[in-house]
Image (cartoon, rainbow, N blue to C red):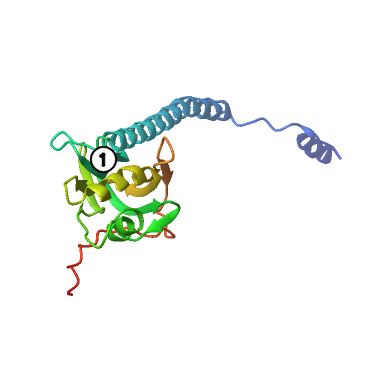
């Protein structure tokens, strides 16, 4: 019975933790204290790198930002009586002209010839000049895509065009070298950012003046 009592007493006695457990706890706390600041610094550096890269991308886009606008005039520095329709790039980066819609009196025009015949041509003679409305427009450039100099032969047509040009609405879609795109509408004060250029426009394009019909 004495032996059994000794076994029971040993079983009831609480087990003492190993002597090295306080040392393990101390080492664990020390490791946490060392690792946590390193983790915080790593996260901070990663965030700083992201912010810096994002700022760099925005700066690059700002330094190559195009701004295309439309204008019409009835004179130029070189020629007094010259009506023109033009696109200008007032931004700091090149503009890739993608699409243009030219609307006269509420009707989309397919080309300059159609517009001039609808609005202004007196008789069968076409006396005006055209240029392309696509390609790249460099910063500070101005491209006239329709223009007419007043002469004695076209004075009636010129006067009509000078009145009717205010009924024209131009929309153009252009993109930067980073494929950021905008739509400029001559009825609005600012261009609108778009993901892709509209596909439902009546595309306006240059058309060579046809030769006069044989009589």
Residue at image mark 1: 88
Looking at the picture, tell me which residue is in the foreground, 123 or 115.
123
Residue occupying the point 40% across, 40% down: 191
Q: Can residue 130 be seen in the rendering of this structure?
A: no
Looking at the picture, tell me which residue is in the foreground, 87 or 120.
120
Residue count near mark 1 (Cα–Cα under 10 Å), binned few <14, some 14–19, many ≥20: many
Residue 79 picture quarter: top left
Residue 91: % across, % down:
27, 35
Residue 65: % across, % down:
30, 37
Q: Which quadrant: the N terminus?
A: top right
Residue occupying the point 20% across, 66% down: 210
In the image, taking residue 192 as reference, residue 120 lies left or right, namely left
In the image, taking residue 68 as reference, residue 155 lies left or right, namely left
Q: Can residue 2 be seen in the rendering of this structure?
A: yes
In the image, taking residue 93 as reference, residue 182 lies left or right, namely right
Residue occupying the point 45% across, 25% down: 37
Farthest residue toward the bottom? 215
Looking at the picture, tell me which residue is in the foreground, 33 or 208.
208
Q: What kind of element bears circle 1?
A: strand
Residue 147: % across, % down:
22, 48
Tell me how many marks there are: 1
Looking at the picture, tell me which residue is in the foreground, 53 or 18.
53
In the image, taking residue 166 as reference, residue 21 lies left or right, namely right
């Amino acid at each position: 019975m004495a032996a059994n009592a000794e076994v029971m007493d040993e079983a009831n006695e609480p087990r003492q933790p190993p002597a090295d457990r306080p040392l393990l706890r101390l080492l664990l706390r020390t490791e946490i204290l060392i690792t946590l600041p390193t983790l915080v610094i790593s996260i901070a550096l990663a965030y700083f790198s992201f912010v810096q890269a994002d700022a760099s991308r925005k700066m690059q886009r700002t330094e190559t930002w195009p701004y295309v606008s439309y204008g019409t005039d009835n004179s130029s520095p070189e020629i007094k009586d010259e009506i023109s329709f033009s696109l200008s790039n007032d931004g700091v980066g090149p503009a890739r002209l993608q699409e243009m819609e030219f609307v006269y009196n509420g009707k989309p025009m397919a080309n300059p010839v159609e517009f001039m015949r609808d609005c202004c041509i007196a008789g069968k003679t076409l006396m005006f000049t055209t240029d392309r409305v696509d390609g790249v427009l460099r910063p500070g450039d101005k491209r006239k895509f329709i223009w007419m100099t007043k002469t004695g032969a076209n004075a009636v047509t010129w006067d009509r065009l000078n009145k009717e040009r205010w009924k024209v609405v131009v929309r153009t879609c252009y993109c930067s070298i980073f494929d950021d795109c905008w739509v400029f509408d001559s009825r609005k004060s600012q261009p609108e950012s778009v993901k892709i250029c509209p596909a439902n426009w009546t595309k306006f394009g240059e058309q060579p003046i046809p030769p006069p019909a044989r009589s």
